[in-house]
Amino acid sequence: MIRFTDVHKRYTNQYEALSGLSFELDKGEMAFLTGHSGAGKSTLLKLIALIERSSSGQVWVNNQNLTRLPKWKVPYYRRKIGLVFQDHNLLHDRTVFDNVALPLIIAGENHREIGRRVRAALDKVGLLGKERNLPIALSGGEQQRVGIARAVVNRPPVLLADEPTGNLDPELSLEIMHLFEQFNQVGVTVFIATHDHELISRLSYRHIALHQGRLA
Amino acid sequence: MLSLNLPNYLLRHLQVMLYSLGQLTRTPVASVMTVLVIGIAIALPAGLYVMLHNIEKVTNQWDDASQISVFLQHTTNDSRGKQLASQLTSWPDIESVDYRSASEALNEFRELSGMDEILDTLPKNPLPPVLLIHPTKSAQQEAIQQLLERLQAMQEVELAELDMAWLQRLRTINETGQRGITIIAVLLSISVLLVIGNTIRLAILSRQTEIKVIKLVGGTNAFVRRPFLYTGFWYGLVGGIIAWLTLLITLLAINGPINKLASLYESQFNLEWLSGQMFISLPLFGLILGVMGAWLAVGRHLNDIEPS
C-alpha cells in the first residue's frame, strides 16, 4: 500500500531529514513509526500526505507514484488519505458536525449523504451526542476523536496519524489506539507515528524505527 | 473523482454565496466602510459622466442655432435697421433676419438679468440695435465665415459675431473633460480593485488556519478561492448599488437649481438622469471589479498558504 524506495529528503540548508529510506507497508496493515523527535517521523508522514515531496527516490501509495503526481491532482489524492494530527487541526468557529463534514463538503457530497456519514463517523468515535458543540467545549481526548472522525469520514484506504496521543494521558491514549485498531480491522491501512514506547509495547504491531533519518 | 452533479454544484455555489454574505454581516462596520469606499469611488466618475452627458445635450440643442449677431452702430435708427434686415434676407446664404431695436434689446436684457435698478440708473440705453441672422441650414462653415466678413465690412455694422464660436469652445472643453473623466474613472477603478484586493487579502490572512485545514483534507484551490470571490462579488455589487443611490440623491439635490437656471435661460432643458441605465451598469461594473480584485488577491496569496 505504501512503498518507499531509496527516499532522500534534503532541506535547503543541506540538512538531510531522510536518507536512503526503503520500506513497504501492506494493504490493511497497521504499523507504528517510532524514533526520537527529529528522527524524521513527521517528514516521512508529510511525504505520504504530499505536504512535502522527496528530494530523490520514489514514494508509491495505493499504486500511485507520488513523485510524478502533478500539483493539481494533489487535493484529489489527499481525499484518499486520512490525516490525524497531534494538535487536532480543528476549526474552532465551527461545530463538531461541520468540522467532520468538511472533507465531504469539499468532495461535493450531497446534503443527505453528508448528514448520514458524519453521524456514522461520530458514532464510531462515540461523540454522536456532541455534534452541535464547538470543539472548544470538548476535552482534549474528545477533540482528538473529532479529528479522527474527520479523517475517516470519507472512508480513506489509508489513515496516517502524527503523535495522535501526544497530549493525552495513558488511559485516553490507549482508547484512541483501540479506535485505530477498529478502523484497521475493517481494512484501513493505519500508520501511526509516536514516541510513546510504553503505549506501543502494549500493542503487538510492527514497528518501523527511525534514527537520524534512517531505518534503525 | 470529478463527477459533477449540476444541481448539486449550483446548490453549493448558492450556499457559498450566501455564506460569504453572512460572513460580511458578521463585521457590519468594516463591511459598510468598505462598500462605502467602493460606492463613492464608482459614483464619482459616473456623476461626472452624467454631468458631461447633460452639457453635451444642451450644446446639441443649440447645434442648428448657429446664428450671427450683427451689432449696429448706436446711431442707426429703427427704420434703417428694418430696411437692412429686409435687404439682408435676400442674400443667398441667409435664411431669415430678426431685427431687434435698442429698446427691445434693453427690455429683454432687463427681463432676463433682473438688474432693473442698475439699468434705471444709466443715463441712456447702452445697448445697440441688433440684427439676428440665421444662415441657411445648408451653409457650410466657410460660407458662414465669408458671410461674417461681408457683414463686418458694411458701413452701419459695429460688430458681427458668430454665436457658434463660444459653442465650439465649449465643445472642445467638453471633449477635454471627457478625456479627464475617462482617466479619473480608470484611476478610481484601479483604486476600487486595490481596496477590494486588500480587504480580501486581510480576510485570507485571518483565515489561514482554515485554508490550511481545507487543503489538508483535499480542498482544491478552486474550493478555497470560491468564498473569497463571492466576498468580492458582494462588495462590488453592494458598492455599485450605493454608487447609484449616491448619484440619484445628488441629482435629486441639484435638479431644482438646474431647472431654475434653465428657466432663466428660457431653455426647455431637463436634467437627464440616466438612472435606469446606471441602475444596471453601476452594480454590474462594481461586481466585475469586485470579483477581479478578489481574484487578484486570492491568486497572489493562495499559493503562499500551504500546510507544513
Image (cartoon, grey):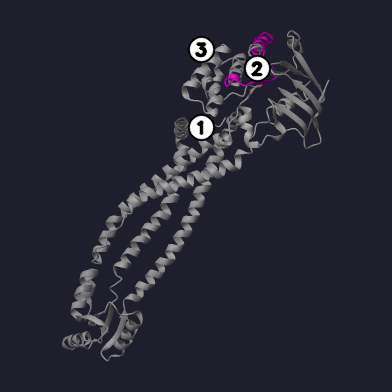
Q: Type of residue at label 1? A: Leu
Cα gap from disc 3 to disc 2, whole angstroms: 26 Å
Asked if both marks, 3 and 2, belong to the same chain, the answer given is: yes
Cα gap from disc 2 to disc 1, whole angstroms: 27 Å
- Magenta range is A152-180
Q: Type of residue at label 2? A: Val
Residue B193 on image: x %, y %: 51, 48
Mark 1 Cα within 10 Å, few/some/many (few <14, many 20+)?
A: few
**Residue at the spot 63% in from the left edge and 34% down from the top edge:** A73
Query: Image quadrant for the N terminus of chain A?
Result: top right
Q: Is residue A10 left or right of residue A140?
A: right
Q: Is residue A186 left or right of residue B186?
A: right
Mark 3 or 2: the one toward you:
2
Element type at marker 2? loop
Name the residue beneath numbered marker 3. A129
Residue B197 on image: x %, y %: 54, 44
- Which residue appears farthest toward the left when viewing the image? B79
Element type at marker 3? helix
Name the residue beneath numbered marker 2. A188
Mark 2 or 1: the one toward you:
1
